Image (cartoon, grey):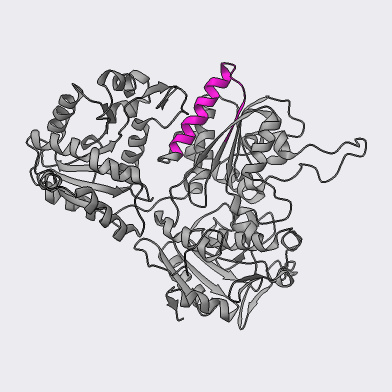
């Protein structure tokens, strides 16, 4: 896996192309060819208006040989950097890299670690923190880069220098690392300052070779959340937060500061699909706030996810109170907790109680009300397409309605970028179009991706053999299936019965026990313990987790008959069978299972017509 950019040339060549005219049109055409979509109009305007302001400074500074990489895709994600300048650090032979974020803003003001673009506008991510995120992923995942030869700049070429000075990292008191690595430059006298910085950081000697080394450098694989959760909670920030991830993180911290000053309660909702980093944001927030002595609690509706967090965070006894469940706030004093981080908020239930207390004839309060009331800053992380069982009611509409009824304002932050599936939103989009959970213009034909591998298997054995080979290469792989087979109790000797039967192929479901039995991990560790391979997971053991390669067996509860047909009679889970909208619940289930893989997926339907659909859509076939 290597870095990719949309366009590369020397600054001098790029200046000549700009002078000839039509450069942004050429770049737009190239964008459509590479990414199979039209670029945002704001991007096109930035190419036309902002790129020349940097290129001309490079040429004026005598740096015409410096290489310019446009729209460089960041490692591990689909986030793209506006401009990356590559050359040699003056008086050395070391590669020097300058990351440039272009902003066309004409007005900007500081706001508690964030910025506003108008007096009545909402707080936005500070661009220095945005660039710091880019630098983090480069230095963390590209081994050829050296810290001291890497820096970032924000090019605010339309904004007055005095206004930009007020939001510079040192003036606004951003983190020390951001102050050291990132600077902002506006119009006027700042243009000379920027030119001087470029001269100090770059020379054109061997620039083309340095750029080639950078683009061909191996990218380290990303570690999953559980692998580093202990560091994240106990010691320091671990994961680079990019774009809206960082905006959400900073907005919650701003809300905490304002709450301590007596500001009215505001509900923060962070919305994103699978792999957009919701749980990373949640755990990073918990760690940061706890280290700042803020009383913060992480809550979910998932027993498996919470217990796994306990294990990997190294928590025991009373320490586990930092990770709890949605139904534990029934008796909480309103506002007693500073921050509740409600992860996987789509799993919120109607109420926290199964029935009314015998001595209390009133209806129990909605669980969402308990969460909002208990926290001074309630934070919900939500994916509405992950409602997979009866009784789960978490939705943006529910949170908005209850926040309004309880007299709270609400801020919604949408996560757009993909960090799972090797940073390939194309795969997630394809899955959603395939399952008709997102609009699709015509048949969702599969287009092979460089960084994500997808196969369809004729048999579950072919799937298993492929995934076993990946496990032998030290990758993590799991097979999960729809809930279409019985789930028996363990055999008398503690072994698991082979309940999942497809032809001659037989495998057990994952263990339902709370502890290890004969080396088989408990249900809540199926997705993370290496010994989980060989058992078949279900939606409840897979949801919220990730592994390198995902095998998905589509049962007869979802079949293709010139359109999807959901068949309740083949499903064995009472919570799904009795769901009001079984059709949506089942499609959501397979969406979740199909998007657990970070590097690849293998699909197999036990229904021949459905398996043939996948083949007809262009998914490569595993023969054996």
Number of dots carrying numbers: 0
Residue located 50% across and 40% down the image = 281
Q: Is residue 57 above or below residue 510?
A: above
Task: Please state if 470 lies on the left or on the right of 26 as rendered.
Answer: right
Whether residue 36 is visible here, answered yes or no, is: yes
Residue located 24% across and 51% down the image = 25
Question: Would you say residue 258 sits in the magenta stretch?
Answer: yes
Nearer to me, 441 or 149? 441
Looking at the image, the residue that sits furthest to the bottom is 504
> Residue 83, percent across and down?
24, 42
Q: Is residue 319 above or below residue 385?
A: above
Residue located 79% across and 36% down the image = 365
Whether residue 522 is visible here, answered yes or no, is: no
Residue located 34% across and 31% down the image = 128
> Residue 241, percent across and down?
42, 39
Read off the magenta span: 245-268
Kindly report the secondary structure that dominates the magenta region of the rendered protein.
helix
> Residue 10, percent across and down?
12, 47
> Residue 38, percent across and down?
35, 54
- Which image quadrant is residue 243 in? top left
């Amino acid at each position: 896996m290597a870095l990719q950019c949309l366009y590369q040339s020397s600054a001098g060549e790029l200046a000549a192309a700009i002078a000839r005219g039509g450069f942004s049109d050429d770049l737009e055409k190239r964008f459509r060819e590479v990414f199979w979509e039209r670029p945002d109009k704001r991007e096109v305007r930035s190419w036309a208006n902002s790129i020349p302001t940097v290129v001309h400074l490079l040429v004026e500074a005598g740096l015409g040989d410096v290489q310019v990489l446009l729209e460089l895709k960041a490692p591990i994600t689909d986030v793209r950097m506006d401009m990356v300048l590559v050359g040699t650090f003056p008086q050395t032979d070391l590669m020097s890299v300058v990351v440039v974020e272009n902003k066309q803003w004409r007005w900007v003001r500081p706001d508690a670690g964030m910025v506003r673009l108008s007096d009545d506008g909402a707080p936005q991510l500070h661009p220095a923190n945005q660039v710091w995120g880019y630098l983090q992923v480069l230095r963390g995942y590209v081994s050829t880069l050296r810290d001291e030869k890497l820096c970032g700049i924000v090019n605010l070429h339309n904004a007055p220098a005095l206004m930009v000075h007020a939001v510079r990292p040192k003036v606004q008191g951003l983190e020390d690392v951001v102050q050291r690595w990132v600077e902002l430059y506006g119009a006027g006298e700042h243009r000379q300052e920027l030119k001087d910085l470029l001269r100090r950081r770059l020379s054109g000697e061997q620039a083309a070779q340095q750029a080639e080394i950078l683009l061909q450098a191996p990218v380290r694989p990303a570690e999953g959340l559980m692998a580093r959760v202990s560091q994240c909670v106990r010691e320091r920030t671990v994961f680079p937060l990019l774009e809206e991830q960082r905006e959400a993180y900073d907005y919650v911290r701003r809300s905490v500061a304002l709450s301590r000053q007596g500001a009215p309660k505001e509900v923060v909702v962070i919305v994103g699909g699978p792999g957009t980093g919701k749980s990373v944001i949640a755990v990073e927030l918990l760690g940061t706030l706890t280290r700042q002595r803020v009383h913060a609690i992480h809550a979910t509706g998932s027993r498996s996810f919470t217990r796994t967090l306990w294990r990997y965070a190294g928590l025991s006894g009373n320490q586990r109170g930092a990770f709890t469940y949605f139904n534990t706030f029934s008796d909480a004093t309103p506002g007693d907790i500073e921050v509740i981080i409600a992860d996987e908020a789509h799993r919120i239930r109607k109420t926290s109680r199964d029935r009314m207390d015998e001595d209390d004839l009133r209806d129990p309060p909605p669980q969402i009300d308990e969460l909002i009331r208990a926290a001074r800053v309630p934070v919900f992380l939500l994916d509405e397409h992950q409602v997979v069982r009866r009784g789960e009611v978490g939705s943006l509409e529910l949170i908005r309605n209850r926040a309004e009824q309880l007299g709270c304002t609400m801020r919604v932050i949408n996560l757009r970028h993909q960090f799972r599936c090797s940073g390939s939103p194309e795969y997630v989009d394809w899955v959603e179009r395939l399952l008709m959970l997102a609009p699709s213009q015509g048949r969702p034909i599969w287009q092979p991706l460089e960084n994500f591998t997808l196969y369809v298997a004729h048999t579950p054995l072919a799937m298993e053999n492929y995934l076993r080979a990946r496990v032998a290469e030290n990758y993590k792989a799991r097979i999960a299936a729809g809930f279409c087979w019985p789930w028996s109790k363990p055999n008398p000797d503690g072994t698991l019965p082979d309940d999942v039967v497809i032809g001659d192929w037989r495998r057990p479901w994952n263990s339902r026990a709370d502890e290890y039995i004969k080396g088989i991990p408990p249900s809540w560790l199926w997705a993370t313990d290496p010994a989980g391979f060989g058992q078949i997971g279900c939606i409840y053991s897979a949801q919220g987790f990730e592994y390198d390669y995902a095998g998905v067996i589509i049962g007869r509860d979802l079949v293709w008959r010139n359109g999807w047909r959901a068949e309740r009679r083949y499903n064995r889970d009472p919570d799904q069978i009795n769901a009001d909208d079984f059709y949506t619940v089942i499609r959501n289930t397979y969406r979740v299972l199909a998007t657990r893989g970070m590097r690849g997926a293998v699909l197999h339907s036990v229904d021949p017509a459905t398996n043939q659909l996948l083949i007809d859509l262009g998914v490569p076939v595993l023969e054996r």
